[in-house]
Amino acid sequence: MYSEKVMDHFSNPRNVGEVENPDGVGQVGNPVCGDVMKLTIKVENDRISDVKFKTFGCGAAVATSSMVTELVKGQTLERALEISNQAVAKALDGLPPQKMHCSNLAADALHLAVDDYYKKTGKKAPAKSSKAKAKAKPKAFTKE
Ligand code: FES
């Protein structure tokens, strides 16, 4: 049912915990199941120098959380905002269809952490920031 990569990241999750004095924090709950993920980042020279996660959720949520930290470590903030939930699931060699919703936590929490960094520092977020995207959406969709 699960790929070897999912089982590996579930059994040996990478970057578990919280970074000290984080520059950005993103927390997101999954409306489908109520599971929660918190992701903290440290930023140096517009790059994510450290990232850790805490996930209160299922095995797929733990695996996607672990994978997103691996994908984003050392990357620029701009690149971090480009990482999608689908990309995280793909990097794990896929998830079973009924578990795809679990992948929503990982990239969403990452994007919120990056947004939080921009908010705290007062720096200008790139146009593809999730906040900027939300603003660009018609009002009827922002309440979802
Ligand atoms: S069942 Fe909740 S995130 Fe997977």
Image: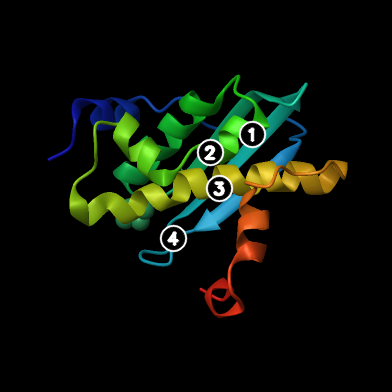
Q: Which residue is mark 4?
A: 30
Report how far apart the C-alphas of labels 4 and 2 lie in the structure.
20 Å
Q: Mark on residue 82?
A: 2
Q: Secondary structure at mark 1?
A: helix
Q: Are marks 3 and 1 in contact (CB under 8 Å)?
A: no
Q: Is mark 3 within 8 Å of ligand 1?
A: no
Q: Are marks 4 and 1 in contact (CB under 8 Å)?
A: no
Query: Hey, which quadrant is residue 90 in on the image?
Result: top left
Type of amino acid under label 4: Asn
Q: Earlier in the sequence, mark 3 or mark 2?
A: 2
**What residue sits 24% from the left and 38% below the top?**
94
Q: Earlier in the sequence, mark 3 or mark 1?
A: 1
Q: Is mark 4 within 8 Å of ligand 1?
A: yes
Q: Which residue is mark 3?
A: 109
Q: Earlier in the sequence, mark 3 or mark 4?
A: 4
Report how far apart the C-alphas of labels 2 and 1 lie in the structure.
7 Å
Report how far apart the C-alphas of labels 3 and 4 lie in the structure.
11 Å
Q: Earlier in the sequence, mark 4 or mark 2?
A: 4
Q: Which residue is mark 1?
A: 78
